[in-house]
Image (cartoon, rainbow, N blue to C red):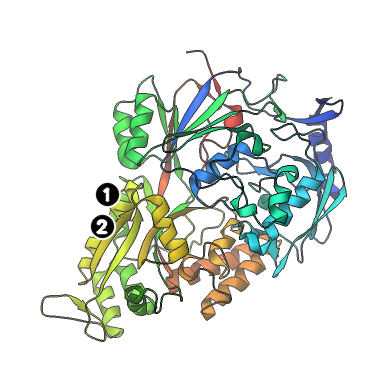
Amino acid sequence: MRFSGKNSLVLIVFVLAVIPLWGQKGGTQDWLRTTAEAGRPGGTLAFAERAEPKTLNPAIAQDRPSRDVIRCLSGDLIHINRYTQQIEPALAKSWTVSPDGKQFTLQLRRGIRFSDGSPFDADDVVFSFKVYLDESVHSPQRDLLIVSGQPMTVEKVNPYSVRFTFAAPYASAERVFDSLAMLPRHLLEKDYTEGKISQAWNLNVAPDKIAGLGAFRFKRFVPGERLVLERNPYYWKMDAKGQKLPYLDELTFLFVSSQDAEAIRFQAGDTQIISGLSAENFAVLSKEQSHRYKLEDAGPGLEYNFLAFNLNDDTEGRLPQVARHQKWFRDLRFRQAMSSAIDRSAIVRLVYRGRGAALASQVTPGNKLWINPDLHPQEYSIVKARELLQAAGFSWDKDGHLLDQERQPVEFTILVSSSNVQRTQMATLIQNDLKQLGMTVQVVSLEFRTANERIFQSHDFDTALVGLAGGDVDPTPGMNVWLSSGQTHLWHLGEKKPATSWEAEIDQLMQKQLATMNYRQRKKLYDRVQEIIATEVPIICLASPHILVGAQPNLGNFRPGIIENYVLWNADEFFWRSP
């Protein structure tokens, strides 16, 4: 949706859809009217998370539980509808694009207020992007805001108009604004000026010290048990009948230890909506499905599970055992041999019970716009794997144990989060597959936060079984993974320049696709990125699950999508029908 030139008629339609009402202090308020089924106010909803959020700070949040909560607390300028996958106006009611594709001028809604009643305007937008773009903040969103090596610039045109300028045409600029939460300058500017923005809004924050533009606001946090949000009385959306959203009075996040516990709480009615069901639990619940809940298979999603190699350069002298194992991992033939020895079809069959897909790259079959059709999942072949290892100088002793060039046994670990049953099952299957090559592999299952600390901070791991879910079907949200400088560039975290020539090529390709406006040309560039990942194997892409979800049948406007968050993306529209 680019509202310029030939699209001027579309702009008029959207402007007419805005309902000007009198705000709390005598000004007009530009409400956004939704097209979803009109409901009735009242009631509560509970949703289970398999770990506590780490933070409520949008500028630094990386873990899924934090992002899930923050999405309910915050608002973005332009939003991606998870059901239609199309962009929609949000805090920006309209926008125009310059002929050269480098400038985006957004018109903000008037009379909008944060959840503490303070007004929102262009100053908050400029401040928000100042924070996201600040290198010292280490925001995971920063990679999305850099084109051709230069960060975007943001300027206030007037109190309700903001102009964004990029160094080159930005093909997916409108979609990038999604999930970039607008921050309240009046609450966070002091923290930012003092260099403390990263410490702001931890889970112990007082409710009156945090505010957002989402449908809900922070009410209470009970460590180890729950986090409770309450209805935001200043929310800026209404339904087709003119009723203010959200309908729900409260939204509660319950903390559970595992996927099984999550399913049990849903089955018992402690939670009324569930996302990311394992195939096993989906099958069990399906047998007992009744008037109490309904389940849905939304088909292939965007989540890709993979085995990541620790190729970080900071382990020498600090983690000697890890550093010794890295000599194997840095050998392409060793990585290719491991990939050949993993039976992906068995993972789909045994872990996902057929409700999943084997992967050739990081792009899943659910992303029909961007998947490279010339790539196919690695064929399972122990014979090929042994040939690759022999060519790399590995050998076997009389008992079949794999030895490296120094006649040392090949032994290493796979790190996995204990809260994810499916990944733990995958790790066990991989352990058995690699045993056929003579490798001794131990599965190390750790609590979610501890596992993340090892991967992202201390780098104290050999390999790790990880899952990432794209925030959009477009390649751009993956910038922080595939750029060598990215915050989630797992195999070489924090490097100042590309460690290899192929990483440098990926950097160039990802930056070029950002500035290419033609979809076909962009796709060729991203097809090449997928080809490099499949060839160089810095990660071994394994499988992607279907999106398996459920809800109580009387929950109105339940519309799951394949873009994260699958079920809570439209929580502002949820309502309870009469039993």
Looking at the image, is mark 2 or mark 1 earlier in the sequence? 1
* Residue positioned most to the left: 398
Q: Secondary structure at mark 1?
A: helix
Q: Provide the secondary structure element on which disc 2 rests.
A: helix
Instruction: Choose between 114 and 430: the one closer to the eye.
Output: 114
Question: Identity of the amino acid at label 2?
Answer: Leu
Q: CA distance from mark 2 to mark 1?
A: 9 Å
Q: Name the mark on residue 350.
A: 1
**Marks 2 and 1 in Cβ contact (< 8 Å):** yes
Residue at coordinates 42% horizontally, 41% vertically from top-left? 276
Left or right of 469 on screen, residue 288:
left
The answer to whether any part of residue 360 appears in the image is no
What label does residue 429 carry, if any?
Answer: 2
Residue at the spot x=65%, y=68% of the render?
511
Q: Mark 2 Cα within 10 Å, few/some/many (few <14, many 20+)?
A: some
User: Is 571 left, or right, of 542 in this rendering?
Assistant: right
* Furthest residue in direction top, as rendered: 578
